């Protein structure tokens, strides 16, 4: 998979996706367009640079929703720069940030942003905490969140589950499934199956499965159940 060239792109009529960069511990960044919808998913470091060079300011101002799978830095590192850029460029349309319940990173970034810029934010931001697996709609896209398994180390070497979800985006009868960072799990297996596109992480370095990321073999076995798939978050 080393020869993967970013951005990875996929398009079916007016439903498209661009994956700018997905390197474990460095950066993820995904743009989904579906009719009027302009979604950014997991804006990691470099998202502003990549969106500017690929799409331009006009398109960036149209971003309607940001979706966060979990709060690790390689998935949220670009949120601050995106929010402040949209302020400076005088975005007017509202922005909704969807994130899993318990993801304190997003709430903290948002609170700091609001605290710093208070009366000078020209657009309305809604934080939408996802607490269950109910589907919801935005801009004619149906979004189905699902829980995934993703852990992190504590100082004493033990691990804890982080608030982490994947998303399935359905538009015009086409489905894109993105698991975020996850170990092999039933929910992802179920949602990736028969999806038109599955974006599956394969961040685990060796062949022994664990509860943080998937091995290449695990990721491929899920990817193959979708009509097409991309492996992301692959160690370089
Ligand atoms: Zn992670």
Image (cartoon, rainbow, N blue to C red):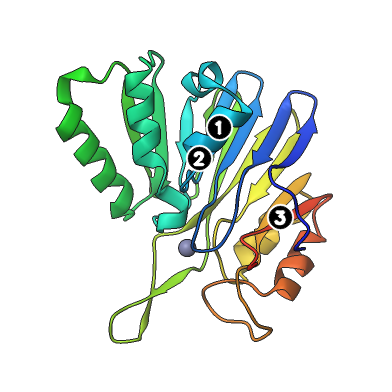
Q: Position of residue 101 (x, y in %)?
A: 35, 52
Dot 3: element = helix
**What residue does disc 3 label?**
192
Residue pictured at 82% horizontal, 50% vertical: 228
Dot 1: element = helix
Residue pictured at 48% horizontal, 43% vertical: 43
**What residue does disc 1 label?**
51
In the image, 222 versus 62, the foreground residue is: 62
Q: Judge from the rendering whether residue 65 lies leftward or rightward of residue 233; answer left or right.
A: left
Label of residue 177 in the image:
none
Q: Position of residue 219 (x, y in %)?
A: 71, 67
Quadrant of the rendered image containing residue 17: top right
Q: Judge from the rendering whether residue 10 lies leftward or rightward of residue 86; answer left or right.
A: right
Does residue 132 appear anywhere in the picture? no
Dot 2: element = helix
- Quadrant where the C terminus sits is bottom right
| Callout 2 crowding tier (Cα within 10 Å): few <14, some 14–19, many ≥20 | many
Q: CA distance from mark 3 to mark 1?
A: 27 Å
In the image, 27 versus 185, the foreground residue is: 27
Q: CA distance from mark 3 to mark 2?
A: 25 Å
Q: Nearer the viewer, mark 3 or mark 1?
A: 1
Q: Position of residue 76 (x, y in %)?
A: 41, 49
- Quadrant where the N terminus sits is bottom right
Label of residue 47 in the image:
2
Residue pictured at 53% horizontal, 63% vertical: 148
Are dots 2 and 1 in contact, CB under 8 Å?
A: yes
């Amino acid at each position: 998979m080393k020869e993967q060239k970013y951005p990875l792109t996929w398009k079916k009529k007016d439903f498209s996706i661009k994956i700018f960069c997905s390197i474990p511990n460095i950066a993820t960044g995904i743009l989904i367009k579906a009719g009027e919808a302009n979604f950014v998913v997991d804006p990691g470091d470099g998202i502003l640079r990549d969106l500017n060079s690929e799409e331009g300011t006009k398109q960036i101002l149209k971003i309607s929703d940001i979706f966060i799978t979990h709060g690790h830095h390689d998935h949220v590192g670009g949120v601050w720069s995106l929010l402040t850029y949209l302020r400076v460029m005088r975005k007017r349309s509202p922005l909704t940030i969807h994130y899993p319940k318990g993801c304190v990173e997003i709430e903290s970034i948002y609170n700091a942003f609001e605290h710093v810029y208070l009366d000078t934010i020209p657009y309305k931001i809604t934080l939408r905490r996802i607490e269950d697996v109910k589907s919801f709609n935005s801009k004619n896209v149906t979004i189905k969140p699902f829980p995934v398994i993703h852990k992190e180390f504590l100082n004493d070497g033990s691990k804890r589950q982080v608030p982490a979800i994947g998303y399935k985006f359905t538009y015009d009868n086409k489905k894109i499934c993105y698991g975020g960072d996850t170990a092999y799990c039933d929910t992802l297996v179920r949602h990736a199956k028969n999806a038109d596109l599955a974006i599956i992480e394969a961040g685990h370095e060796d062949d022994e499965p664990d509860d943080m990321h998937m091995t290449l073999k695990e990721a491929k076995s899920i990817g193959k159940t979708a009509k097409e798939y991309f492996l992301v978050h692959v160690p370089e």
